[in-house]
Amino acid sequence: MPPEKPEDRDLSPYTGYTRAHWEAAADALLAAVEPYAIEGGALYQLPGGRASSSGGLSDGLEGYARTLLLAAFRRDGGTLERYAEGLAAGTAGIWPRVEDHGQPLVEAASIALALRLTRPLLWDRLDDGVRQRAADWLGDALTAEPWPCNWELFPVTVGGFLQEIGHEPEASRAAIDRGLERVEEWYVGDGWYTDGEIRAFDYYNGWAMHLYPVLHAWLAEDTRLLDLYAGRLSRHLEDYARLFGSDGAPMHQGRSLTYRFATAAPLWLGALTGRTPLSPGETRRLASGALRYFLDRGAVDGRGLLTLGWHGPDEALLQAYSGPASPYWASKGFVGLLLPPDHEVWTAREQPGPTDRADAVTPVAPPNWLLQSTTSDGLVRLHNHGSEDARYDPYYTRLAYSTATEPSAAYDNSVIVGGDPSRTGIEPLGVGEGWAASRHTAGAGAKVTSVVLARGAVEVRAHLVTGAPPGTSVRLTGWSPKPDTRAELLPVLALDDDLTGTMADAPTLFVALARLTGEPDPLPLRETVTVEAYPDGELRLRWSAGGPEVRVRLDAFGVEVDVRRGAGAGWDG
């Protein structure tokens, strides 16, 4: 439920939210979990009926650590006192040890960051014995082996705090250097990281890969590191700001989506460090839009608890590591409360975000994505031609995602070869003005070379299938519609009205028109673009209403795209 505060549509014309709404939301979330504290406040055993793969004890620690982080951003002395009691109890033998590849390593990072942020209010007021026990418990994180992904930043975060208080300074320094060094291997440029060695691109870029190094540099007052990491964050935000719909919805893609408005964390972080391409009013509009989007749609249940899901409970988007308290990584979205009430990010009038301002089709080179947004309906669509998980995952490996839809069990946005919808081994083939392309391994041993071309809300999707036996069925699927949206998919080449075709004796090109829109009465899809498609892999497009002409060639080795603009710009031959 939304905070019980009056809206301020003068200061915040898009969301109505002010700092008071963020404070009220934080207070309500913290008050709601208090009845579930056990073992002297060391564990928070939240209801939910589902334990994570780490077990109930670890889940209870998770409840403590993630809500402590929220209390640290809120900086309320009375609430922090409650968590001080839990720290004393937890380090007296209740908490599980931090070990290699264990969930307590994740939670140790939240505890260390919270202690560092609130040191005068919490840490400095603890008894010496509690401080020593807590430092010893956290110290195991310095040498614990993390999983090779964003987990590498957890020892960095713990090391930053322990170094500050003078506990094992050499080991702390070594943990910081080691983690930052490993993560550096996954920086791919223009503000983007992969989440480990695989091409996994999602919100972990914002709420982990940027958040922890930037906060560490900021808290350490390390100008060199801050220039490096906050500079990358600023570049990332140029793309990141385009992932939010006009209703505040973040893009429905990737894992750990139950963290919900943790998506606001990098937005606030840019304002906190002064390294952001966004104006103060745009920052608050996007962040408050995300918070309000979820609070208005049932993310919090009748007890005031965050549920395991997106809007309400939804097990379809959970992972094995998701436990009852996992959603409280949403606490990261409250990092903006570190900014004082008189900071311009709180006092400036909200300004429109990218989706509010103009239609756009934006190539994002590092993940090989194409972002397509329209102001008429406020939707953002993400065409994925470069991100995947280590296995087939509907939240990573579909061809497209949006702020209004979610991956369906019917394999939306897929190329289904021989009845097999899998898409693995995605190889990016480039992005450019209005297009993105990739190649992947599909069913029946086939290879699929794909290109999407987009303008407004319209898409031309072309797939050249090779390596499948003649007669193998190939079916294309499009968007799975949701209320207030309309999804269309029309055949252009080698497909029947059910969007199904068959392989010929040679590589076969399949082409369709697609559209996802919230407009009630859009122009007929076939009137938006003229497509001349040739079985040899060539396409010629003429967008309506003065749009460009585009020629595309697909073959087993790649994709070539030429764009021509201006009256009479045709193709010879």
Image (tube, rainbow, N blue to C red):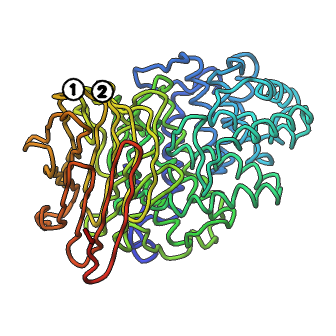
Tell me the quarter of the picture where residue 303 sits.
top left
- In this rendered view, identify the residue nearer to me: 388 or 2: 388
Amino acid under label 1? Gly
Q: Is residue 272 left or right of residue 469?
A: right
**Which residue is labeled 1 in the image?**
419
Residue at (71, 44) in percent of width and height = 184
Rendered view: 431 above or below 495: below
- In this rendered view, identify the residue nearer to me: 444 or 525: 444
**Which residue is labeled 2 in the image?**
443
Rendered view: 261 above or below 168: below
Residue 295 appears in view: no
| Number of residues whose C-alpha sits closer than 10 Å to that of mark 2, classed few (under 14), some (14–19) or many (20 or more) | many
- In this rendered view, identify the residue nearer to me: 247 or 468: 468
Residue at (49, 21) in percent of width and height = 52
Amino acid under label 2? Gly
Q: Is residue 411 left or right of residue 214?
A: left
Rendering coords of residue 504 (x, y %):
18, 35
Give the secondary structure at mark 2.
helix
| Number of residues whose C-alpha sits closer than 10 Å to that of mark 1, classed few (under 14), some (14–19) or many (20 or more) | few
Q: Are marks 1 and 2 in contact (CB under 8 Å)?
A: yes
In the rendered structure, which disc, 1 or 2, sits on the residue that comes first in sequence? 1
Residue 573 appears in view: yes
Which residue occupies the extreme front position in the image? 573
Q: Report how far apart the C-alphas of labels 1 and 2 lie in the structure.
A: 7 Å
Which residue occupies the extreme left position in the image? 497
Give the secondary structure at mark 1.
loop
Q: Quadrant of the C terminus?
A: bottom left
Which residue occupies the extreme bottom position in the image? 567
Rendering coords of residue 120 (x, y %):
80, 48
Res. 507 mark = none
Rendered view: 380 above or below 469: below
Rendering coords of residue 489 (x, y %):
16, 50
